[in-house]
Image: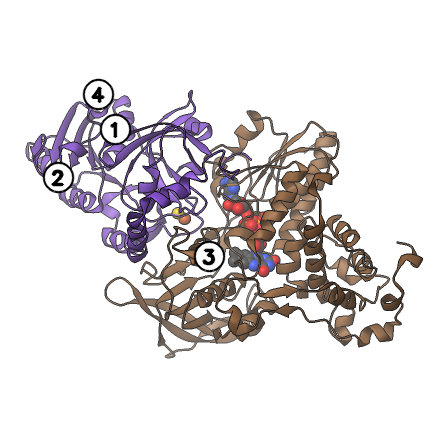
Chain colours: A brown, B purple
Amino acid sequence: MTESSKPPLLNVLPLKERMKIPRQHMLEQPALERATNFTEVNLGYSEELARQEAARCLECANPKCTNDCPVGVKVKDFVRLIVAGDFMGAAAKIREDNVLPAITGRVCPQEDHCEGGCLMGKKVQPLGIGYLERFVADYEQRHLDTSKLPKAPPTGKKVAIVGSGPSGLTAAGDLIQRGHEVHVFEALHTPGGVLVYGIPEFRLPKQIIREQIDYMRAMGVVFETDVVVGKTVTLDELMHEEGYDAVFIGTGAGLPQFMNIPGEHLNGVYSANEFLTRINLMHAYEFPKYDEPMLDLHGKQVAVIGGGNTALDAIRSALRLGASKAYVIYRRSEAEMPARKEEVEHAKQEGIEFRVLTNPIEFLSDGKGWLNAVRCMKMDLGEPDASGRRRPVAVEGSEFNLPLSVAVIAIGTGANPLIQSTTPGLNTNKKNYIEADPVTQRTSRRGVFAGGDIVTGSATVILAMGAGRRAAQAIHEYLSTWCEW
Amino acid sequence: MFKILHAEFLAPGIKRFVIEAPRIAQKQKPGQFVILRLYEHGERIPITIEHSDPKAGTIRIVVQSIGKTTNLLNSLNAGDSILNVVGPLGKPSEIENFGTVVVMGGGVGTAMAYPTAAALKNAGNRVISIVGARNKELVILERELRETSDALMITTDDGSYADKGFVTDKLRQLIENGTRIDLVLAIGPIPMMRAVAEMTRKEKIRTIVSLNPIMIDGTGMCGGCRVLVDGKSEFACVDGPEFDAHRVDFSVLVQRNSMYRTAEQKSMEEFQHDPKSQIEAVHAEQPGACALEGGRQ
Ligand SMILES: Cc1cc2nc3c(=O)[nH]c(=O)nc-3n(C[C@H](O)[C@H](O)[C@H](O)COP(=O)(O)OP(=O)(O)OC[C@H]3O[C@@H](n4cnc5c(N)ncnc54)[C@H](O)[C@@H]3O)c2cc1C
Ligand code: FES
């Protein structure tokens, strides 16, 4: 970008003036209206709003935003291109580091990464980097001609990616750009991992994921769904019989955890994975247009147990399905909730009730096998535990019953076990997560790499993408040099 | 897309399909199942694999029309395709030489018991098969089972074929006659499996049942298929589907399987109201009709 091609008005503003522009609010559906539909909450920036917001960037010499981004998106550079009105250029700039911008722009916890580091946030509000990323990615989608995507010359090397969540998709996207043949194997019938089965439509429209996957197909990535590696085919068969030179495992942490308290088998008690999979992957919210059924939640009292993104996604879905009361039951205080801040705000606006410092101890039956209340105890915060958060301690004699028809358990997940149990020589840790080098993502098996939630335990989309990116780099080096393991 | 190569009715409402699924055919072992989805708007349902032919790259399933999805499936024919078929899922049956094994199949459960019966026979067991159906027309796989069993007994509820009565009557006779039984495998409706379990519990005969809870993914991801075994939660899709009958809490299984009864009835009523348009919706997605996901793309 040359100096002269910049439009004059906005970005010649002196720093002080830039600080005076308020953070541009993203339009969203009104809370009461959106609480009854599954359409996306945030509506996006217009071109004007985007350029206005971009003009706030202070263009720091040592930008912390890029440093704090797990994939190192060159924020300053793409924001400058937005100011200049070169939105396709901005998209290309982001894609150098991030192959799924429309997704991260929507679901990244920006407050922990880029925006958390933004200098402006110290004085006023941080630059809306997530909003800008989302704007650019959506603009690109509307204007892109996938038939014109550049194709790298083929290297003749073949890589299998197991799991099509953000780690696998990132590794696939990076490897295809380097000319390797890439096949993605996915157990479910639709690629996308948690992005399609977990995160609901109102936060991440499925169309966006389809578009990102179509983009990858256009670049040459082959997707094979309905393949459970470890069952349908083993990792060794992929390498020895089907000729894959390297494998990346990104199978996620999808094993639901239950609370092991009485009553968990009652009808009406769900794991968050089942609840969300029915709604998202299987479209049960559109029953009977789609065949997968869901309990009728109209006029029902529903609670989710847990305080992460999963919990909020589940309870906000329940509200949209007609629940008359929707509670979040969380055993610590709101400050400890791991969910994205924006989601907590949105949930409150929509009328979700937060029952913090509360822990369920038993699900109670109506006598016919259906849930009709949950027995809880009040909690206090004690000394910090291993996670650094203050440990919740039960308050004696504080038991009470909360009437309830449906309870969704969202207290965390464990490692998907199928590959570990069928791949000899693949080292795992005590919790059955795969051991991988933090820089190269190499596992104990030659030619096998792993990353994302299956290595770290449940984390975030962007951390999984970071792992996919490092793995792709290391796989490329491995395939180019056949280096020692 | 998974192509149907052959389809035939074995009995009214019970259809057998041969499906092209090379990866699954390579791997299938008796006792395992697939999860399939017919079309974009379809639900995912588990179906036991009755047989597979690794050389031909095909699997065989037997389906009874019960709800909307099985009715839709049974409207498909050779040349049609199923959008998604994933498997083989679940743990294979335990196959070794136990001695004398009684294999019991109730209704379409007979088709699920058959591959295990054949494998047990191959492993050197004496196999006594007991097959039950509501009436003569619904007796299936008689010829196949006769070939793989040392003895075959058949009962019909109405007495229209073979002996009138239930499979448990035959089991009781065997026990009363003092027949040595080392293992019982019972697959069929829950009341039947439960009755078998009660009968063999007293006799201390090891008994295996194959459970059919509601499933979605079949890979251990949703927990919807959880069953109570010895008071502990097990996921039928990965820890099962076969369990020790004497440890299973059948009441919880019955209760959990009733969870969507209202919705299932609604689906079925809609289907019965206008089966033609519903079947057309599946056919509209057949190959050539439009390009869709499923398998390699
Ligand atoms: C409801 C919910 C909401 C969330 N919200 C956010 C958010 O707002 N922001 C954020 O940053 N993070 C969020 N997360 C976390 C984030 O989604 C995960 O950290 C991320 O998806 C992990 O990516 P991954 O690639 O490791 O695995 P996953 O996304 O879990 O994908 C793994 C894939 O592998 C497949 N698979 C598993 N085993 C096999 C096998 N044997 N063979 C073939 N395929 C297999 C699975 O079916 C799945 O598709 C959320 C998670 C959930 C559940
Ligand atoms: S079917 Fe989902 S865990 Fe078994």
Residue B139 in picture, x, y percent from top left? 18, 32
Q: Is mark 3 within 8 Å of ligand 1?
A: yes
Residue at 54% over, 35% down: A425
Q: Tell me the chain of label 1.
A: B
Element type at mark 3: helix
Which one is nearer the viewer's eye here, B64 or A396?
B64
Q: Tell me the chain of label 3.
A: A
Q: Mark 4 points at which residue?
A: B147
Other-residue count near label 2 (Cα within 10 Å), few / some / many at <14 / 14–19 / ≥20: many
Q: Do the residues labelled 2 and 3 touch (CB within 8 Å)?
A: no
- Give the foreground label among 2 and 3: 3
Image quarter of residue A152: top right
Tell me, yes or no, if residue B20 can be seen here: yes
Q: Name the residue under label 1.
A: B117
The residues tagged by marks 2 and 4 sit, at their Cα atoms, a distance apart of 22 Å
Which amino acid, mark 2?
Thr
The residues tagged by marks 3 and 1 sit, at their Cα atoms, a distance apart of 39 Å
